[in-house]
Amino acid sequence: MSSTSEPNTLVIGAGPAGLAAAYHLVSSGAPVTVLEMDAVVGGIARTVEYRGFKFDVGGHRFFTKAQRVNQLWDEVMGEEFLLRQRLSRIFYRGKFMDYPLRAASAIRTLGVMESVASLASYFWAQLCPLPEDSFEGWVANRFGRRLYQHFFKTYTEKTWGMPCTELSADWAAQRIKSLSLWGAVMDALFRSRKTKHTTLIQQFKYPPLGPGMMWQRFRERIEADGGRVLMQHKVVKLRHDGQRVRSLVTAGPEGEQEHQADFIINSMPLNQLAMIMEPAPDEAVRQAADALRYRAFLSANLIVDRPEPFPDQWIYVHAPQVRLARLQNFKNWSPHMVPDPAKTCIGAEYFVWPDEPLWRAPDQEIIELATQEIASLGLIEADEVLDGAVIRMSHAYPVYDPGYMERIQTIRNWLQQLDNLYTIGRSGQHRYNNMDHSMMTGILAAENVLGACHDVWDVNVEQEYLETAQD
């Protein structure tokens, strides 16, 4: 054990999960060191700045029913939080449809006859449901096949790069949960004040300078309380004796360094964690880790010479004629994201595999593609784009393909022998967590270091989603 009265902990990764764990530990008087491979904190929830314009990587709302997380956000940001009214829409067939669902908008987009046919399709699905062994079956049973084809199939296949029949129903069950056509229609018609589904949240909090402002505050508080946050320190080895992790090795500005600790809290991708173990795990574990896949995120962040190209914070682009999947207007998340009110900053988001040509394309080629695709939708003129920068995140979205759960369980079973290692967060658990879920896993892991006995993997398996609003 360490020479202090509290256990010494190493936290791998300075994203929301890792920072939440470290913050909880130092607030409890326990020594902690965070090891981050990048030069900025925040992980995939970071904020990137280019020529004074700020870009959120993907768009991150701060809203949760988890009071511990909400209190933590307020503790760090205080009254600086902005309260934002949500506006997001679907772009489909050359028209905009309100999202969350509003009956008049849906009918206007689909037309009366197709709306009636879609409703009939929904009732048919209740009488003759499909097997729920894929995303397609799960969604079609709750919305009907016609609405599934209109509003789920194209966007989902853009996001995941595979047919919906090959995407596990687990992803829909986790992300959509109890939302159904009937529930959405009831909310659209009556706007119940008692409960709203996650996707129906109308207000959220947002840091004035983007999420990165929040994570930088976390870093500052951790360091002020005696913790360390070491940037550009990539963990390349975890050395264990079959019962405990004894040390880990980082590659950083000073070369390779060995670090010892009583506990390790990990938020690096689960497959990478398994691969850097020394001694290596058995062949079955290595094969399971090698088969886990992550979808990469690529954003062309454009500086546009127009004060208000569209009023939304974000738009889901269901148009099949473009590769573009989602658009962000960061000025509408916060006016402080732009240094010049006559201009705006747009994020054009693409979801790719790391081995495909678009991921490896030169930045200027990606900027030109995004510019032309947005212009083809009629949202901007191509000559209004003044400049741009590209963001790439290689492990953004854990893929729920056939067999993924068995692979995770194989890795988990092997990791359980190491009684001082906890793995947390979206990447660390290969689970499509939001920030609140990820931070809860970090908090619970920190409490385990201090003597609790939480099952960290139990976060985000309940049927009620953490972002569901309740009065």
Image (cartoon, rainbow, N blue to C red):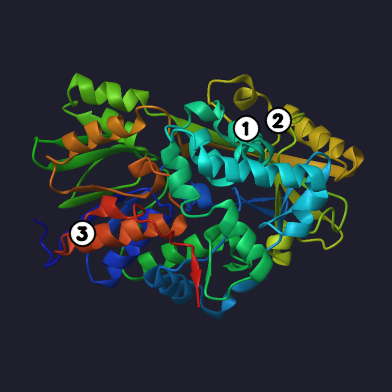
Q: Position of residue 105 (x, y in %)?
A: 78, 55
Estimate how packed mark 1 is, as few (under 14), some (14 to 19) or many (20 or more) residues with alpha carbons within 10 Å.
many
In the figure, 225 relative to 462: above or below? Answer: below
Helix, strand or loop status at disc 2? loop
In the figure, 307 relative to 391: above or below? Answer: below
Q: Nearer the viewer, residue 442 or 288?
A: 288
The label shown at residue 180 is: none
Contact, mark 3 vs mark 1 (Cβ under 8 Å) = no
The residue under the point 28% across, 53% down is: 458
Between label 3 and label 1, give the one nearer the viewer.
1
The label shown at residue 454 is: 3
Quadrant assignment for the N terminus: bottom left
- The residue lying furthest to the front in this view is 127
In the figure, 158 relative to 388: above or below? Answer: above
Q: Position of residue 90 (x, y in %)?
A: 72, 48
For the residues labelled 2 and 1, the Cα–Cα distance comes to: 7 Å
Q: Is residue 311 left or right of residue 232?
A: right
Q: Position of residue 102 (x, y in %)?
A: 72, 59
Q: Is residue 115 left or right of residue 462?
A: right
Helix, strand or loop status at disc 1? helix
Q: Which residue is mark 1?
A: 158
Q: Nearer the viewer, residue 338 or 349?
A: 349
Contact, mark 2 vs mark 1 (Cβ under 8 Å) = yes
Tag 2: residue type?
A: Arg
Q: Which residue is mark 2?
A: 323
Q: Is residue 418 visible?
A: yes
Helix, strand or loop status at disc 3? loop
